[in-house]
Image: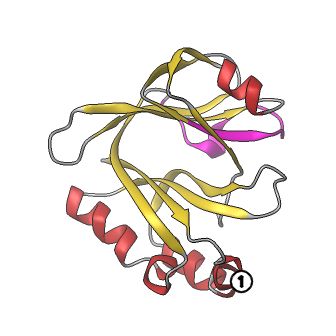
Amino acid sequence: MLYFVYTADRPGSSALREELVEAHWAYMDGFEFHARGPTLSDDGETATGSLHIVDLPSDGAARAFVTEEPNWRAGVYAAMQIFRFEDLVGRTMWEFPGPEGERFLVTGAAGEPVGDGVIVHGRLRGLDDGAVHGFAACVQAPDADAAARTVRDGRDLTVRPWCFGGRR
């Protein structure tokens, strides 16, 4: 089953994140991903969080995935969100046919990303009840405003700069 995991960095944790990068990647090497990578500051220079769309056997395994991760254990992350991810595109980020470009994580209460720039897209469902809590999409667009415009009927959108991450 696929899970959407987003962790937001604790302010001032950049040095600790850099110190733990190899431990983080080594931990992640044991999992299968549809997408992964850091969200970034608006200037694209500083990590602000981490996105993982990961294949795990259960809700408990999804919770353990985060709490056992080296960055979480060391205090890099301030908060986490975990949802079941209902894949609506059917490909991983590595299968995205588009050329390199600016990439964004777009989340919202409602909306449907459309167009050639959609990398991955899915509904976010609650762990305990399976209720729909919104959507998440990774998109390629010229800028954040254009990324938001890729969402038809979008509501309560959050757009974060994002890039492919980790080792493949």
Q: Position of residue 39 (x, y in %)?
A: 65, 54
Mark 1, other Cα within 10 Å: few <14 / some 14–19 / many ≥20: few
Judge whether residue 58 can be spotted in this image. Answer: no
Identify whether 55 is placed above or below 133. Answer: below
Three-letter amino acid code of the residue under disc 1? Ala
Identify whether 150 is placed above or below 10. Answer: above
Q: Secondary structure at mark 1?
A: helix
Instruction: Tell whether 63 sits left or right of 151.
Output: left
Identify whether 78 is placed above or below 158. Answer: below
If the image is split into quadrants, where does the C terminus sit?
Answer: bottom right
User: Was residue 104 drawn as part of the magenta stretch in this picture?
Assistant: yes
Residue at the (51%, 71%) spot, across then down: 77
Q: In this view of the protein, which residue sits in the foreground, 93 or 37? A: 37
Judge whether residue 148 can be spotted in this image. Answer: yes
Q: Position of residue 33 (x, y in %)?
A: 49, 54
Residue at the (70%, 81%) spot, across then down: 18
Residue bounds of the magenta highlight: 90-106
Q: Which residue lies most toward the top here?
A: 153
Identify residue for label 1.
Answer: 15
Q: Position of residue 38 (x, y in %)?
A: 65, 59
Residue at the (53%, 36%) spot, across then down: 91
